[in-house]
Amino acid sequence: MDALQSSAEQALALMRQQGFEHAQVSVSCTHRHEVCVAHNEASLLRSTQSNKLRLTGLLDGRRADIEGGELDPQSLQALVQALWVSAAAAPQDAANAVSSAQRAEVTRGPQQADTGMLADAMRELLDWRARHTPSVMLEEALAGHTHVQACTLTSGGSALRCALGWYDAGAFGMAREGTQSSSFNFGGGNADSLAGEPIVVRFGLEDMLRALTRSVHTEPIGERCTGAVVLTPRAVGDLLGWLFGQLGDQTLINGSSVYRHSLGQAVASPLITLASRFDAPGVSPFSSDAFALAPVTLLDRGVLRCFALSLYGSRKTGLAHVPVEAQGWEIAAGTTPLAALVGGVPRGALVDRLSMGRPAANGDFSGVIKNSFAIRGGEVGHALSETMIAGNVAQMLRDVSAVSAERIDMGSVQLPWLRVEGLHFS
Amino acid sequence: MTTPASHELETREHELRKTRMLMVDGNLTVNLRTVERGISARAYVDGYWGFGSEPLTDAAAGRERVQRQALANARSMSSFGARSPRPLPAVRHVGRQQYQGRTPLTSAECNERLAELHAWCKGRYPAVRSTRFLIGDEHHAKALVTSLGGDSLARIDRAACVFTLVGEDRAGAPIEVDEWISGRGTLADIDWSLETLAPLLERAHEHLQAKRDAVTARGGLQTVVLAAPLAGMLAHEAMGHPCEADAVIGGAITASLVGQPVASELVSMVDFAHTYDGQPTLIPVQVDDEGTPGRDVVMIERGVLSGFMHSRETAARLGQAPTGNARAYNPHDEPLVRMRNTAILPGTSTLQEMIAGVDDGYLLLKTGNGQADSTTEFTFGVTLAYEIRGGKLGRAVRNTTLSGSAIKVLKTVDAVGDTMHWECGGYCGKKQPMVVSMGGPALRARAHLGGQ
């Protein structure tokens, strides 16, 4: 860490010497180890080390960024000079700025990789698959450990240091019987340790693998209809991706966000509370524009409490700046048991994956539901094929009628199942 | 020819440089240049792989360290049990790939052109709510040495410019139209001058006006004319991924269909290594990241499934020849089976003839992104489309989704366009991102559209 701090200080001094009025320097060193499975067999142990130096320079309101991987004085000098050329050519923009007076040091998670634990995790997964879901082909699976040391300094006096370690695991595969295959599916997440319980009981992997074996033989949903969907936590993640796009810099700066006038208003069902978990495994405690992240509630019982703007976006739009990052969020658990959530659907589908293009700028979408099952009379039935749903994402958030008491903790997100009414099936 | 492969080693020095600039309404919100250099080694020992990488500083010492790491990692995998090493095809390539483009544009030149484009749009389209111009280029240089005697330098250089016009429909909801330009080389080698973009901007603005009154597509099975960019996406997503040999081994439905019809006889599909029609492809792969010389893979020949894309390992498993499709994206990535320049080959119909032959259907012009499945079922977002009624274009259609089984859809193809369109602006995702190109002519087929 001392070497990173020294490199950051050296880079900041060079930028001041070059003439930058404001500057931000971030230096990081990342080590990763992963044990990989390919086609139901252990395949690869991979160990990587990468360095990243990112410089942000402001000159008379003009801004540029540059990244390199070499920390020696000559390389630093060359990067600073290249940055100077880029910044000098950029247009002026009074919204450009760097953070001030942010100070924090965070050490979190396992700092050393236990490659034996990674191998054990994959061995357990392969054994479990062979015993319980032999028709599943794990095309890829991995268990990994990442360790990141990072230091960020700004000319405004911010100094942020962290040493983060975390484990992760994931699986991607399908089930096959004879010449027929299920759709593929995938899942995974981050954790402070992979020991203690098999990874198959983490991240919803067991449900996913068992569901694959029931998805080889599929049927269409039948005639067109309107009904409800129960979204699994993985599918709920897709809704959040769209929501963050609507609350971020680009759509708010250009005025196309459907929520641009919605601060303090209900934009989702009162059953939805979306709050940060910036202390979760694998989640950075700092924003990329050098702010220490404090806990924040984005949606409080459906009411939009803040936007997800960067410092630049905030200065550009005049909207309040609340530092956030895309990772590290949870939807509060509801009070409805999952079984009751499904039991309350007269007609609809249990949806694990939405395959579609990006929703339109206004939230309209249509997509094929994958790894999904029909629900009739509150009972989960056959796997679905070639079934499409259409709706509007913003409306779906408002139409959530139940939130499960159960959640899946995937590390960077923790999400429940949601029941949403009024989707069109075809 | 194969080798016993009890101990193989490949070492790669890889430099990746990128430029990315985004101007939103005259504000330069992204102005980033990156360079990453790394050295990696991959070892194959007794049937297991090991990989190690680090930043490229001292090449000689680094080479020794990553090779030692890769060998140690491969050996440690024996804790999973002894296995009979699978002999890998013995291939090697010696050569240096060169690319000589124009002198790269300076930051100042890029900024001047972005500002000019923004000012032109602001003056000409005052009712447009927002304009975005994203430009970028990306350059890979990979020096590879293998224990089989391979010694090569491979280069990928590509550039792209995409603009987006944002407006409002009659109800005040946001609508968008975008356009891509991409090609080999740097931002100096593709033409994104105002002179060239002005007619494209005019056309995009006309589409944006049409989308203000867009109607919802009728959901269900429809006759569709896919413009060339969508055919390229269909080739890549819907049939390309299921023809990657690791997906085939993983259970993709294509495994049991070799030699069988999977498309209309009008359809042939190829993953080109480095040359198409006597010219270099947009992503020319002379040699892949395992040292295998690139060769074309014919996946569908006149409607019949005929071959798969391979790494050395998948080729060994399926008893076929490696094809040069093992590619790694960044300096710290191991090679995976990836596409290169995947295309449906042109036919004889004009786009006008194809539209004129549709009594009731849709012309699909642009796609946002797509996904495919091991079953060959695919889904594409369609961001620009028009009705076809009585052989003529009608109203614009709101954003919709095209889906179906690629095999079923390709079997319904009854016309293939005579004009190829290639592009290389986006990324393919599969554990790692990858730069690829896609090509195709327009197609007429039957497929499902999302709607009500």
Image: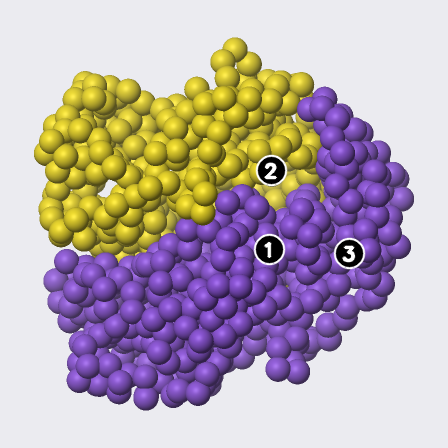
- In percent of width and height, residue B267 lies at 46, 74
Q: Colour of chain B?
A: purple
Query: Is residue B203 at all visible to an observer of this figure?
Result: yes
User: Circles 1 and 3: CB distance less than 8 Å?
Assistant: no
- Between A77 and A129, the one lying in front of the other is A129
- The residue to which callout 3 is attached is B291
Q: Secondary structure at mark 1?
A: loop
Residue B385 figure quarter? bottom left
Q: Secondary structure at mark 3?
A: loop
Q: Amino acid at mark 1?
A: Arg
The alpha-carbon separation of the residues under discs 1 and 2 comes to 15 Å
What residue is shown at x 42% (from left), y 55% (from top)? B376
Name the chain letter of the residue that bears numbered label 1: B
- The residue to which callout 1 is attached is B338
Q: Colour of chain A?
A: yellow
- Against B451, is B350 above or below? below
Name the chain letter of the residue that bears numbered label 3: B
Query: Are the numbered discs 2 and 3 placed on the same chain, yes or no?
Result: no
- The residue to which callout 2 is attached is A38
Callout 2 crowding tier (Cα within 10 Å): few <14, some 14–19, many ≥20: some
- In percent of width and height, residue A407 lies at 31, 23
- Residue sticking out furthest to the top: A196
